[in-house]
Image (spheres, rainbow, N blue to C red):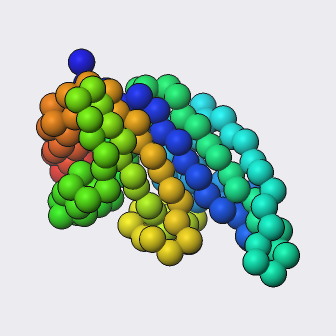
Amino acid sequence: MPRVEKLVIQVLCYATEDPKKVLKAVENVLGADAARKMSMSSERLEGYYGDPITLMRIFLLDRELCEKALLRIFSSLSSSERDELWRDRSKLGRHGGKLYIRLDKQEAFLGRIRPSDKDPIRIVVELRGDVKALRKMLEEKLQAMRAEEGS
């Protein structure tokens, strides 16, 4: 059965940013349930001018919450943005693959999910099984969610 295996999120926190606000942006993307189940590690880096930068790595391993988080992201993207992700930002193999999502960190803090390559929240979605079947299943669930919201 095709499934979303895990999410690996990377985000940079610059010296001028509050780490709690950066984590809040990630929580806004994943949802509160997923945020409670995520694990995190961080690494101190140094910028070009010697400024401190923290690389936050966040892992979500609960498959059900991974799928919910991915549907949450997809529900905020247009059909053409989702198509672009599957077409241009994926690496697919015979037994699964990876989907690479980049979202605007500032917009995420405000509760809006928008694609962006500028200072993004980077999400790697690890997929298992027949990716075409998984995509179809996710799109059907997304349609069902939207129909439920409309009623």
Q: Nearer the viewer, residue 146 or 11?
A: 11
**Residue in the foreground of this view, choosing between 6 and 78:** 6
Q: Is residue 85 visible?
A: yes
Say if 97 sits above or below 91 in the image: above
Say which quarter of the image contains residue 144. top left
Q: Nearer the viewer, residue 135 or 146?
A: 135
Report which quarter residue 36 is drawn in: top right
Above or below, 110 relative to 124:
below
What residue do we see at 70% from left, 56% from top?
55
Q: Residue furthest top?
A: 1
Q: Residue furthest bottom?
A: 49
Q: Is residue 135 left or right of residue 124?
A: left
Q: Residue at x 50, y 75 (%)?
A: 118
- 128 left or right of 31? left
- Where does residue 59 sit, x and y in percent of width and height? 58, 37
Identify whether 82 is placed above or below 115.
above
Q: Quadrant of the N terminus?
A: top left
Give the x, y percent position of residue 64.
41, 26
Kindly identify the residue that appears in the image at 69 percent across and 40 percent down.
40
Q: Which residue corresponds to the image point at 18% horizontal and 64% vertical from the top-left?
A: 80
Report if residue 144 is visible in the image. no
Q: Is residue 38 left or right of residue 123?
A: right
Residue 41, position as x, y percentages in the image? 73, 42
Q: Position of residue 136 (x, y in %)?
A: 14, 37
